[in-house]
Amino acid sequence: MSGTTRKPLPPALKALKPILDALPPEEASEDEMEAKSVKDFTVGVKVFYPKGEIQRESYRTKDGKKVPQHHWRVYDLIQQLPVGKVTTYKVICVTLREGSPRSVGTALANNPFAPFIPCHRVIASDRTIGGFCGEKPKTGSKNRSMVSHCDWKLRMLRLEGVRFDDQGRLIAPSLAMWQP
């Protein structure tokens, strides 16, 4: 095993880990996916999400860190992403008129409010899955002994009705892409 360590899941996603682990694998048939259909991972999730300036100024992550203003703006926009739709890191930064796709990715990799802030609905500009919880997708790896965070992202999107082809590219982008 390599010396890399996996970033821990945000608390809200950690609570969903048993559900995420039970999701059908990405190789599952459409019938298997329908049988375990979960449409919205934010329903019933209780997460404190600071709305006002005073709450946000005093909010600290589990690690005791302040959330940067750019991250708050990313989270506020991502919160509007509907089930069954995806957007890209680039669309987010262009819409906000600040930052870069990488800075949006950094904000989402550090999202303490997942899945309430549905960062799993943001994909790469080339319409591939992108990262999840700070983890990048593994390419060409046949070792499937441990379900990766990116596998969970792909499974959640499939259960929300977003489909990817065998090369990991979004199918029917004209239907699945959200433009704020």
Image: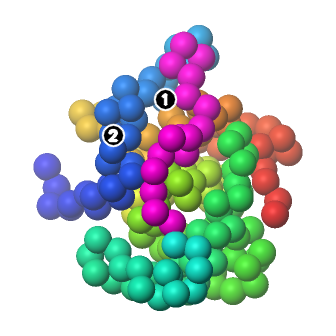
Q: Who's the residue at 50% across and 82% down the image?
A: 56
Name the dominant secondary structure of the magenta segment. Answer: loop
Quarter of the figure with residue 24:
top left
State yes or no: residue 108 in magenta: no
- Taking the image as shown, residue 172 lies to the left or right of residue 139, namely right
Q: Who's the residue at 53% across and 54% down the image?
A: 116
Residue at the right extreme, as displayed: 174
Q: Position of residue 4 (x, y in %)?
A: 21, 61
Q: What's the amino acid at mark 2?
A: Lys
The residue singled out by tag 1 in the image is: 26
Q: Secondary structure at mark 2?
A: helix
What is the CA distance from the residue labelled 2 to the residue labelled 1? 16 Å
Q: What's the amino acid at mark 1?
A: Glu
The residue singled out by tag 2 in the image is: 17
Residue range (magenta): 34-49
Q: Secondary structure at mark 1?
A: loop
- Compared with residue 139, is residue 69 higher up or lower down, i.e. above or below? below
Between 18 and 91, the one lying in front of the other is: 18
Q: Position of residue 130 (x, y in %)?
A: 54, 56
Q: Who's the residue at 75% across and 84% down the image?
A: 97
Between 5 and 51, the one lying in front of the other is: 51
Q: Residues within 10 Å of mark 2 (few under 14, many from 20)?
A: some
Q: Position of residue 42 (x, y in %)?
A: 55, 45
State yes or no: residue 42 in magenta: yes
Between 26 and 165, the one lying in front of the other is: 26
Tell me, for residue 117, which label it has, or none.
Answer: none
Q: N-terminal of the two: label 2 or label 1?
A: 2
Quarter of the figure with residue 147:
top left
Residue 136 visible: no
- Taking the image as shown, residue 111 lies to the left or right of residue 97, namely left
Q: Nearer the viewer, mark 2 or mark 1?
A: 2
